[in-house]
Image (tube, rainbow, N blue to C red):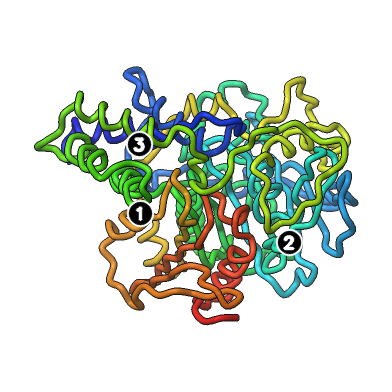
Amino acid sequence: MGKITFFFLLFTLFLSHFVASSLAKRQGDVLGNFYKAKQKKNSVINKSYFTAALENVELDKVILPQDGLKEKDWIKKLPGQPPVKFQQYGGYVTVNESAGRALYYYFTEAENSKSLPLLLWLNGGPGCSSIAYGAMEELGPFRVNSDGKTLHMNDYAWNLAANVLFVESPAGVGFSYTNTSSDLKTSGDNRTANDNLVFLLNWLERFPEYKNRDFYISGESYAGHYVPQLAHAILHHNNLANKTLINLKGIIIGNAVINEWTDFIGNYEYFASHALISDETYLDIHKYCYTDDTYNKPKCYSALEVADNNTYNLDIYNIYFPLCHDGNLTKYPRISSALKFDPCSDHYVHAYMNRRDVQNALHANVTKIQYDWEACSDPLFKNWKDNAPTVIPLLKESLAKGVRVWVFSGDTDGRVPVTSTKRSIQAMNLTVDKSWRSWLYGGEVGGYVETYKGGLTFATVRGAGHEVPSYQPARALSLISHFLSGTLPSGDH
C-alpha cells in the first residue's frame, strides 16, 4: 500500500461513523475522534510498530509494600445493591511513585473463587473506563437502574466463570489519576502496557492467593491494542526474570482494533453487505480510497460523504438497536432485565458513578476532584503519543509462546465490524484447522466459530453489537466460559 493511500486510509478510518443521536460519548466515538486527531498535520503520534522496546521493569523498585491494603479495599456493599454471596474490592494501585500515578481497580470474585481463574478486563477508547462499560454495562455483576441510584443483578456476569478484575487504564481514565499533569499529554500504547504490567505485579502482591492462578486478559475495541501489548510485556518480563511472574494462559479480544489496513475496508464492506450503503458507494470507496493506482482524493471524499449520510441516524455500535431518545433519570427504577439492554444506560451509569456515597463505597476519588467522573477522557486520546498500525505481530508472538488467542466479534456492530476482523485474521496468513461452523446456545445459533493451526480461534456472537456482553449477555457468558475452560463452543449445552 502506497504512502498517499495509507495516509488517507488512516485519516478516514472510523471517521465516517459519527452518528447524530442522544447517545452519550462512548468508546467508539473516542476511537473515531482519535483516528481523526492522529492524522492532523501537527500530530505527534508515533505510528511505529510496537516492539520489545519496553522499559525493563526493575522489580525491586516498582513493587511496593501492599500489607493491609486488601482489607482496606473490601467493599461491604454498594449503594442500591441487591444482596450477593461473592466478595468485591475496589481501590488504587500505585504504578509510578515519583509521578504519583495510580490506577483504580474494581474486583469481583466468584462465589467459588478458589477454583476459578483470574480474568482481567480492559476497555478501549483510548481513554475510556472499564468500570463504566465493562463493569456497569457489560459483564459485571450489576447494571444501573433508570433512577441512577439503584442496581439490579446481571444474571450473566462473568464472575460466574472467573474472578474478574476491571482496571481503569491509563492514568487519567475514570477514577485513575496522576499527580503529574504532563502525564495526561504523554500517554500512549507503550506506557499503558508498562503501567498495566506494574499494576498487575503490585496487585498480585496485594492479593497473593492469585499469584499462581491461571491468568487471562480480555477486552474490546481499542483494547485490541492493550491486551496483546500487555501480553507482550508479561512474556518479555517473564523471560527477563527467568521465572513466571504472571501465569498468563490466554488472551481474548472482541470487536477489536487489530490492523488498520484491513479494519478500514472491512468497515465499508460491512456497510454494503448490510444494505446501509449501496454497492456503488462501496466500490467507489474501495477504488478511490484504498487502491494505489486508482486513488482519487475528490472522488474518495465524495464516496465517504455518501456513506456518512447513509449511516447518520443509526446507532453504529449496533445497527439494529434503538437509539436513546430520553436519557433523563426516573423517580422510580423501571423493571429491568440483563437480557434487555437499555440504550440509555450510559446516562444512568454517569449519574450513579458521580454520587458521593457510591464513590465512598468504591474507595474511589480519594483526591476529591471537583469535576465530574466521565466514562471517557478527552485529554488522553487527543494527546496520545504512540499507536502501532497493527498488533498482528504481537498476536503471532503470543501464539508462538503457547498463549491461547481468541478473537470474537458481535455481528451487528458497525464500529469495528465482523468483516474488518475477518480481514485482519486473514492478514495473519494462518492455516484453517477446523472450518467455519455454527455454535449453539439454548437450542439456537449463538454464533459461528473457526479455528486455525497455531492456536487462534475466531468466534462471532449472533445479534451482538460493539459491546457484546451488553446485547447478548447469555451468549457472551457461554463464549467466555468455553475460552477459560479451553473448549470450543459447538453443540447445544
Whether residue 132 sits left or right of residue 43 in the image: it is right
**CA distance for labels 3 and 1:** 14 Å
Query: Which residue occupies 39% across, 66% down?
Result: 399
SS class, disc 1: helix
Quick one: label 3 or label 1, which is nearer the N terminus? 3
Q: Which residue is mark 1?
A: 419
For the question of whether residue 159 can be seen, the reply is yes
Q: Amino acid at mark 3?
A: Leu
Label 2 amino acid?
Pro
Q: Which residue is mark 2?
A: 208
Question: Residue 486 location, x and y as percent?
Answer: 53, 76
Image quadrant in which the N terminus is located: top left
- Callout 1–callout 2 Cβ contact below 8 Å: no
Residue depicted at 51% across the width and 72% down the height: 445
Q: Quadrant of residue 422?
A: bottom left
**In this figure, what is the number of numbered marks?**
3
| Left or right: where 39 falls relative to 355 | left
- Which residue occupies 70% across, 41% down? 104
**Residue at disc 2, secondary structure:** helix
Residue 418 vertical position relative to residue 169 in the rendered view, above or below: below
Residue linked to disc 3: 13
